[in-house]
Image (cartoon, rainbow, N blue to C red):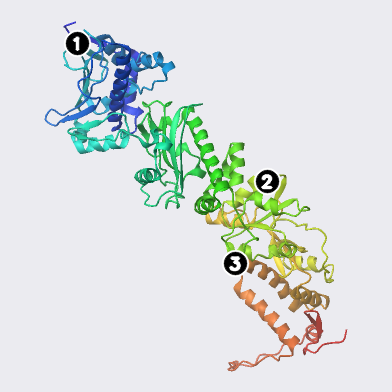
Amino acid sequence: MSESKTLPFNAEVRQLLDLVIHSLYSEREVFLRELISNASDALDKARVVALQEQDFVAAAGEPRIDIRVDSVNRTITLSDNGVGLTHAEAIDSLGTIARSGTKAFAEALKEQKHNLIGQFGVGFYAAFMVADRVEVRSQSGHPDSPGVIWTCDGTTEYTISQGERGDRGTDVILHLREDSEEFLDEARLKEIVKRYSEFVGYPIFVGEDQANEPKALWTRSPSEVDDEEYNTFYGQISGDFMPPATHLHWSADAPIQYKALLYVPSAAPHDMNHADGRRDIKLYARRVLIDDAAAFLMPDYLRFIRGVVDTEDLQLNVSRELVQQTATVDKLRSQLTSKVLRHLQSIAKKDAEAYTGIWEAFGGVIKEGLHNVSSSKDKERLITLARFNSTRSDDASGQVSLAQYVEAMSEDQDTIYYLVGTDHAAVSRSPHLEAFKRKGIEVLLSWDTVDEWAFPSIETFQDKKLVSISRGEVDLGDDDTTTPDVSEDLAGWIGTILEGEVSSVRTSNRLTNSASVLVDDQFGVSNNMQRIMRQLNQALPAAQRILEINPSHALVRTLDQLHKDDRKSEAEPLAWLLLDQARLVEGEVRDPVGLVQRLQVLSTLAAQALGVSPQAAPHPEPAAEPAAEPAADAATEAADEAPVVIDGEVLDASGAQLSE
């Protein structure tokens, strides 16, 4: 073959060229990644063929890939000393897609599980994103095979002719377009090699300098890598100066083939909870970078995981947007997630102190999975991983698992109790806990926002139902304490006074020290959830809550006596004060002026009970004109003389004790 021939592309290639140039790849720089991958594949293929064919021509020198820039002629030449192409292979590999050289070769070697990237497959045509003409000069290693020259300007046809390259291998020469001048800079090319092809298994030279490190740490056996190497590599890929809390390094062959080296940081990344925070998991296909922030490889509740995943089952020649839509990635994500959760379970079992550190850094994020996870097995793992504060510890550092909670339960307890609030101080001193503390029943405590979703998502654990003690009524069994008698209509009367502010009022069996507490409806939206939604600018319709009152408390008993004596002017402020107090405990003050006025009424009652006379103002301001005194209210005067109950003692208005 001496003269050149111009041949048309088949229709499939013409369509593909347009797709590759205009829409397949999101970043033009990947053209170099694709060409390096093709060259690496040619070197792989040469190594295998040399073992099979004794007369296969040897390469000139060690296997390598060279990238050279000619700024004068505006060309980039990428060379390898791999298998090379015959005339027929050039037509089959460069002129069609369905019969890609690598595809056919890979099928022939399928039983040997040899890994090839895609010699002159779709990726080759990425060259036309930066070049208006591409020339391929190749010399096959098969004896007596003449060299071949293939040229194309990216239109509907290509030219092929005979030509001498000299040594075995292939040169791909890109004549750059006017808008691709940045790629004539060797420093820019080294940057691209470092980013995408750092771990390709052959040395890559840009000019005189080697631009990659062929040995990928994750391809080595874990037994060959020490902690210092693991920690150094972690710092390189994450930018974190602190050593990781733990790492896991493994490989798998089924259902997909991959290697992974993943890390759990020792502290939460600063952008972990930012919607656009970086997710440092790098996805490789046969040591060639596909995506350096492959967030789709992990569920969002494991977004703190860092590391590298390298799979044999992904095609290189698709964009990162298309990669994450493949069934392979779905399987890979499932495998990685389960492996990470099992690893965390192992740490929790073997080294509780180390796991406590991990949980303190990432527990709030991990618990998001309790609400969002789709796999029942993964949900079970997450439940065993979850840790909560509880009334077992006096400070915020104590943590228990659900298994530890159940193990400590009494035989007659069939419920796991929990309380979610705004912070440790609020939940640990909540009136809701009083009866539970008196009975020695442990309650899980949380102030993580996510637990408003997490606890209801668990529902049961080891056949024990999870119940919020701030919702509905609480049944703790028979109580051996005596409850003072109060008027049967007291709760209903207070409910009438507070109509529109609470849904109802009832006596409480959860209070021992406090006068009152607000309780969420069993099936309504909790007050804490409404607070969270307001912070997210997604306010929900206000839900009225239930006010529970403690009939043993002096304030409630005093109010009951005032109610019995029809002393409305004093009783009604105290009824409101019960609501004020319940709100104050939750950190809410709706009507500070009204609260102060109601406290003044309570102060006056206390003064009367102690026989303390009201003190005149030290500097009363004279009225402009004496105001006419209103007619005395007989009922009010009578009420002023009525007895008052304080801490079980019946006192008259002067504070003297009356006989029973």
Closest to the observer: 337 or 451? 337
Asked whether the beta carbons under mark 3 and mark 1 sit within 8 Å of each other, the answer is: no
Q: Which residue is mark 2?
A: 459
**Residue type at numbered disc 1:** Ser
Q: Can you give x and y, in whole percent of width and height, for residue 257 in the image?
A: 46, 27
Nearer to us of marks 3 and 2 is: 2
Residue sitting farthest toward the left: 72
Question: Does label 3 or label 2 sit earlier along the sequence?
Answer: 2
Residue bearing the label numbered 1: 161
Quadrant of the drawing holding the N terminus = top left
Could you tell me if residue 643 is visible in this image? no
C-alpha separation, residue under disc 3 versus residue under disc 1? 85 Å
Q: Quadrant of residue 205?
A: top left
Q: Which residue is mark 3?
A: 587
Indicate the secondary structure of the residue bearing disc 3. loop
Which of disc 1 and disc 3 is earlier in sequence?
1
Residues at marks 2 and 1, CA–CA distance in whole angstroms: 73 Å
> In this rendering, would 256 be left or right of 27?
right
* Amino acid at dot 3: Gly
Left or right: where 222 falls relative to 353: left
